[in-house]
Image: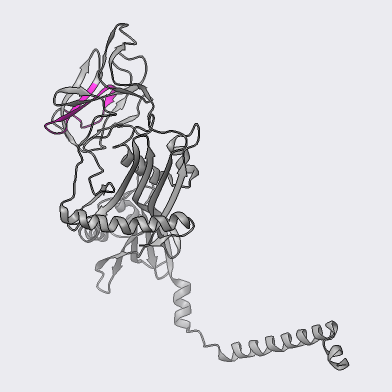
Amino acid sequence: MKKVKEYLNTSVLTKIIIALAVLLTLVALFLVISNRAPISRDVADAENTTCKTVVVVSAGDTLSGILSKQGLSHSQINEIVALLKKDAGINGLRADRDKIEFVRASDESPVNKIVVIPSPWRQVELTCDDNAKWNCNTIDIERDTRAVYKSGVILDGDSFYLAGMRAGIPAGILADVYDLLAFEMDFERDVRAGQKFSVLYEENFSSGAHVDNGHVLAVSFDALRGNVKMYRFKKKDGGVGYYDENGNGAIKSLKRTPINNAKVTSSFQTRRKHPVLGFTRAHKGVDFRAPTGTPIPSAGAGRVVKRGYNSGHGNFVRIRHNGTFETLYAHMSRFAKGVNVGTVVRQGQIIGYAGSTGLSTGPHLHYEVIKNGKHVNPLTVKLPPIDNLDATAKARFLEYRRALDAGIEYLSEHPQMFIVL
């Protein structure tokens, strides 16, 4: 027993461990040196001489100009430009977004490979063969898409934007949520302290690194009139839409508030004292505060039936959306380029810019909705959906929604987790 105690003495044990470590290190070095495969001189030379140049497209750059600076001839440039247009659908470059990589065998060698990177998920490779002919190959980058859940609550004095940012929802996703909920809510009047909200959205990863965000998959908001829910659903024909929990179209033909997060300064009223004229008359629309120059999007798809100036509305645009609804936008500082009488506009297309023309006390948007020739309150009128599902599609949707709700419930209990799509 005594010998064992001496053997386990700390000082002795430490010396033994150090000696063993030195011995093992020497053995390992010998094995590595003796088993190392000789490096091919050709491979080493190739690695040392390959030259890559990456060009980030700047404002004013052209594809021809960039190619010319890399020593490509006029005929090569024409061939490459035509090839990119024909096989890759690339007609031009975007400043601060597109990148082009040039590969040479050495600094003095001509370019033998060009890689155009128009997005994180796609790159186009151009290679020059032995006959000096360029070939084009498009490569789609595999993405790892994950469903992520975020939730929050409106605090006293909050806007939805502030509450959403505090909940960790990216700004771009919040903008998409605004666009969706604007069909059902007025963010100035319908947001109160204590309201809860949640968003399920996509995050895209490549090789383990986050690249960008995808679509909003589901959104829920405890609005004043009740809980508003919307789900993204892909139909059999490939079309995609947003639907409420019962499968009814959630995207309405018109938006109640054309400008997101704009403060209502004057509501729809049958009797209102006019701030300029001084007498009482009906206020047939809703006024939204907006600095001069704020873009004004069309509340729905339609055709411009009037565009002009009058003393009351100032610069205004009137759009007919169908046989039932029209909208009017007044007090514009100017019209958007290309928006004239007869122009067909899509929902969300910019038609003009906020101002204070006509009878106005300050810059704002005056927005009117006309139903069957009669002015109605944009914030309360019942709006028809753009797209409803048939019975078969609705059954598929309800099955999908139940599965999605189960995933949302799991993520709400495990907020640090995600679902691989």
Q: Is residue 189 shown in magenta?
A: no
In the image, residue 319 sits, relative to residue 417, either above or below, namely above
Where on the picture, by quarter, is residue 32?
Answer: bottom right
Q: Main secondary structure of the magenta part?
A: strand
| Residue at point 33%, 42% (across, down) | 228
Q: Which residues are magenta?
A: 316-340
**x and y percent of residue 39 in the render?**
50, 84
| Residue at point 77%, 87% (across, down) | 19
In the image, residue 137 sits, relative to residue 325, either above or below, namely below
Quadrant for the C terminus in the image: bottom left
388 sits left or right of 206 in the view: left
| Residue at point 26%, 43% (across, down) | 250
- Give 272 or 215, whichever is nearer the viewer: 272
**x and y percent of residue 304 in the render?**
16, 29
| Way the structure is coloured | one colour
**x and y percent of residue 129 in the render?**
27, 72
**x and y percent of residue 373 in the render?**
14, 23
193 sits left or right of 103 in the view: right
Q: Is residue 419 visible?
A: yes
Q: Is residue 335 shown in magenta?
A: yes
In the image, residue 40 sits, relative to residue 402, either above or below, namely below
281 sits left or right of 213 in the view: left
220 sits left or right of 336 in the view: right
Where on the picture, by quarter, is residue 379?
Answer: top left
Outermost residue, right direction? 2
Quadrant for the N terminus in the image: bottom right
- Give 315 or 96, whichever is nearer the viewer: 315
